[in-house]
């Protein structure tokens, strides 16, 4: 910028003061932007420092220790870590196909006039707080699964050798499978929204050319849309996975809170976030709180990696689209 | 079967499945809202809003929880919004060619999806441990940390939608940079920024996890920000998990209140965004 010093005595306009104000405003915004970085660093540091006593006591074996005994002050993270991973896996197995279905419906099949309303309704699923999913899952979904889906799975898939161990035990409604179901519903709107948005970035000419040579809608989606948007779709799925891993209240309601690793999907289990939610405010003893914070640190690292990967993939897509 | 009929059949199957997936999503939404109305409406009465949470077996309401939720949400929004707006301003107005902006944007997007219970643990070690007790302040700070990334994101998006010509016109009149931002760009993007704040309020109003070990809960009415304070989400959690039928009933009532408040906020925010011509992309 060219410096033009104009002293305007009638309005009291003082360029030097304005430049100072400008500098201050710019620095303030910059300071707060740096603050966001500091915030992330502070979260990591506080978890690391808070969890350090537990790490010193149990070492790396905390990752595969499967004893969780507050009375004897022996803690192992394996049941919670396993539960976190397995519920998220179930959520992805159910949620991803559903989300892709919704995205395909919204971009290829839906009459244009219904696109916005249906899209908004699906997005409202994401607005419902997780505690509501929890209370609904406990009082409505769990009894329903106990009466219908779980006996059905037991009688069909439960009789197939090699996978029958997944469906052993009484169907009690609450447990790993129910938590996975709830998570699937919760990640559905996130994945569907991203997938729909990236599907819409496919140039119409590609799609129309495919239709022009006689492709069916399914073939257009499989051979044109999905290959073109694959990075974005994977990014969306990772975003959903990040949500599923850290989801707390809904899971806490329906997972049953048992610190053990069971092969059966009907068995109660726990996740990192559910353990924190249930036990943190009542934890006593020198190693209890540090162990919980260490679990939190592990969760943070896992979700950080997943979300960072998702973000990098989506950024790559943006750059591709800009070209 | 000819190739053609097979392709047609595959197509039909895929499209039916995608229709089914959408139907299932909508069905679940309506099932949840239906269950809330079915269990929640009978649980609500005028006394719900004037009496505090009862002991099991006694008559009572949710007044202390509603008060606590409103206060903590308000304080969190008041703290988080300015921070979010200033950061968003930096990203949109000043950070275009700096190395800092992409990193901040990246970190902000991670904070946006980071597990909220982790924020609870963070505030616990930061505030509850040094202060020696749970407090509504700690709960508000935890919620404020959740407000920031939402507001940063929408502020940046909305400021980017303001046409460059508007800024250039202001600069051409010799307006200092900060005045251009505050008097011109903010004004042009005001509705969109409001949308962001409303979405942030909607997000924290139902957050439970960060409050569990910051604000905790309080059986009684309290206006002391330095002590534990009742709030709807934690009350719903405790009451729903309890074995008492009348507590569970109140939990449903609270769940209905929260959900409809949040859905209304979301829908209003969307209309506001549409009206101003912006989009609320995530």
Image (spheres, coloured by chain):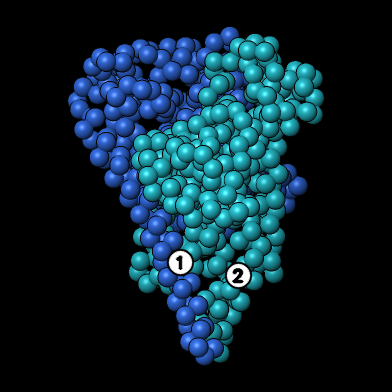
Chain colours: A cyan, B blue
Give percent across and percent down for residue B81: 51, 35
Q: Quadrant of residue A85?
A: top right
Report the residue at 64% width, 58% height from top. Answer: A234
Q: Are marks 2 and 1 on the same chain?
A: no
In this view, the residue in front, A262 or A64, is A262
Cα distance in 3D space between marks 2 and 1: 15 Å
B145 over A106 or under it: above or below: above
B228 over B12 or under it: above or below: above
B192 over A49 or under it: above or below: below
- In the orientation shown, which residue stands out farthest toward the top? B132
Q: Which residue is mark 2?
A: A226
In this view, the residue in front, A139 or B239, is A139
Report the residue at 50% width, 31% height from top. Answer: A256
Give percent across and percent down for residue B82: 53, 34
Identify the element where label 2 is drawn. helix
Task: Name the mark on residue B9.
Answer: none
Q: Is residue A286 left or right of residue B169?
A: right
**Residue B204 in view (yes/no):** no
Identify the element where label 1 is drawn. helix
Q: Which residue is mark 1?
A: B18
């Amino acid at each position: 910028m060219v410096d033009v010093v104009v002293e305007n005595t009638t309005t009291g306009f003082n360029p030097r003061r304005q430049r100072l104000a400008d500098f201050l405003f710019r620095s303030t915004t910059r300071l707060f932007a740096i603050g966001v970085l500091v915030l992330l660093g502070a979260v990591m540091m506080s978890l690391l420092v808070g969890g350090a006593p537990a790490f010193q006591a149990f070492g790396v074996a905390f990752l595969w220790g499967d004893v969780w005994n507050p009375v004897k002050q022996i803690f192992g993270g394996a049941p919670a870590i396993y539960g976190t991973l397995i519920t998220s896996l179930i959520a992805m197995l159910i949620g991803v196909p559903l989300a892709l279905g919704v995205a395909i419906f919204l971009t290829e099949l839906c009459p244009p006039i219904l696109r916005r309303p249906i899209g908004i309704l699906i997005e409202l699923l994401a607005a419902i707080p997780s505690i509501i999913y929890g209370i609904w899952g406990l009082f409505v979904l769990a009894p329903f699964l106990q009466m219908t889906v779980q006996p059905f799975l037991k009688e069909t898939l439960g009789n197939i050798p090699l996978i029958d161990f997944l469906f052993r035990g009484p169907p009690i409604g609450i447990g790993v499978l129910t938590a996975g179901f709830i998570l699937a519903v919760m990640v559905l709107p996130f994945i569907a929204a991203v997938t729909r948005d990236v599907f819409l970035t496919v140039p119409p000419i590609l799609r129309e050319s495919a239709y022009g040579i006689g492709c069916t809608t399914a073939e257009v989606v499989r051979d044109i849309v999905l290959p073109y948007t694959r990075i974005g779709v994977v990014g969306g799925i990772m975003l959903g996975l990040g949500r599923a891993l850290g989801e707390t209240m809904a899971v806490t309601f329906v997972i049953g809170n048992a610190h053990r690793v069971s092969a059966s999907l009907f068995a109660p289990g726990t996740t990192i976030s559910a353990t924190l939610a249930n036990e943190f405010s009542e934890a006593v003893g020198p190693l209890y709180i540090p162990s919980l914070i260490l679990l939190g640190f592990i969760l943070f690292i896992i979700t950080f990696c997943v979300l960072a990967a998702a973000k990098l993939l989506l950024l790559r897509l943006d750059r591709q689209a800009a070209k | 079967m000819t190739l053609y009929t097979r392709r047609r059949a595959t197509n039909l199957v895929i499209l039916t499945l995608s229709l089914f997936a959408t139907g299932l999503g909508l069905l679940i939404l309506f099932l949840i809202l239906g269950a809330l109305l079915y269990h929640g409406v009978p649980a609500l009465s005028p006394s719900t809003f004037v009496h505090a949470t009862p002991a099991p077996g006694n008559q009572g309401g949710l007044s202390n929880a509603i008060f606590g939720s409103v206060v903590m949400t308000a304080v969190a929004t008041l703290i988080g919004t300015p921070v979010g707006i200033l950061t968003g301003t930096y990203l949109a107005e000043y950070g275009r060619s700096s190395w800092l902006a992409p990193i901040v944007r990246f970190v902000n997007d991670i904070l946006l999806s980071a597990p909220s219970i982790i924020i609870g643990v963070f505030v616990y070690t930061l505030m509850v441990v040094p202060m020696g007790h749970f407090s509504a302040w700690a709960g508000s700070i935890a919620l404020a940390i959740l407000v920031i990334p939402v507001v940063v994101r929408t502020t940046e998006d909305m400021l980017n939608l303001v046409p460059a010509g508007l800024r250039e016109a202001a600069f051409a009149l010799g307006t200092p940079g900060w005045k251009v931002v505050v008097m011109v760009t903010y004004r042009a993007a005001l509705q969109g920024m409001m949308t962001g704040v409303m979405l942030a309020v909607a997000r924290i109003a139902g957050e439970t996890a960060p409050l569990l070990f910051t604000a905790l809960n309080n059986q009684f009415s309290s206006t002391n920000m330095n002590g534990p304070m009742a709030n709807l989400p934690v009350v719903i959690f405790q009451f729903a998990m309890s074995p008492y039928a009348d507590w569970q009933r109140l939990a449903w009532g609270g769940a209905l209140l929260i959900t409809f408040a949040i859905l209304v906020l979301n829908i209003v925010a969307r209309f506001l965004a549409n009206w101003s011509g912006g989009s609320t992309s995530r």
